[in-house]
Amino acid sequence: MSTRPEPHRISLARGWKYSKDWQRFFHKPTNLCQQSVVRLRIESDRALRSARLNGQILATSQEPVTSQEPATIQEPASSHASDSGAENSFRFGYDWEITSAVQARNELVLGWPNPDPKTQESEPQIEVWLEIFAP
């Protein structure tokens, strides 16, 4: 039995803007202590071309995962996720430890290769969230 507490999750689903890449600002989570760990997690149906937090490049290399279950990702990786028992869809998952990079106001910029011009104005089809692990 694991004694590691469940993380507090903060969704970054809204507030995205598109110009050349997808951009979103967010504030530093409150009540962080010195032992807190902040992770940035992303799931997408397409591999990222680039990711930057406050101008710092985040690695986006992909390694295929053969599991049919959504992966618990420790490093940038891709996974096969089941779609409610229907046909499988390929999902890419990203997970970065960003504790030392988080500032009072943060800028997250995500880019994909060859975006579809018909969907550039809409919200990205991704899930983005912060996970905060406290002692």
Image: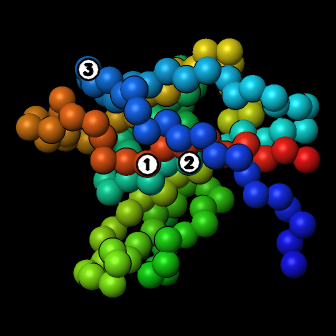
Residue 88: percent from left, percent from top: 30, 78
- Contact between labelled residues 2 and 1, with CB atoms less than 8 Å apart: yes
Callout 3: 10 Å neighbours few (<14), some, many (20+)?
A: few
Q: Amino acid at mark 1?
A: Glu
Residue 19 marker: 3
User: Label 1: which residue?
Assistant: 127
Disc 1 or disc 3, which is closer to the eye? 1
The residue under the point 38% across, 63% down is 91
Q: Amino acid at mark 3?
A: Ser
Quarter of the image where one finds residue 96: top right
**Can residue 97 be seen?**
no
Locate residue 9 relative to residue 127 in the image: left or right.
right
Callout 2: 10 Å neighbours few (<14), some, many (20+)?
A: many
Residue 41 marker: 2
Disc 1 or disc 2, which is closer to the eye? 1
Mark 1 vs mark 2: which is more N-terminal?
2
Quarter of the image where one finds residue 121: top left
Front one among 9 and 89: 9
Asked if 129 appears above or below 70 in the picture, the reply is above
Residue 49: percent from left, percent from top: 36, 41
Residue 113: percent from left, percent from top: 26, 41
The residue under the point 51% across, 60% down is 77
Mark 1 vs mark 3: which is more N-terminal?
3
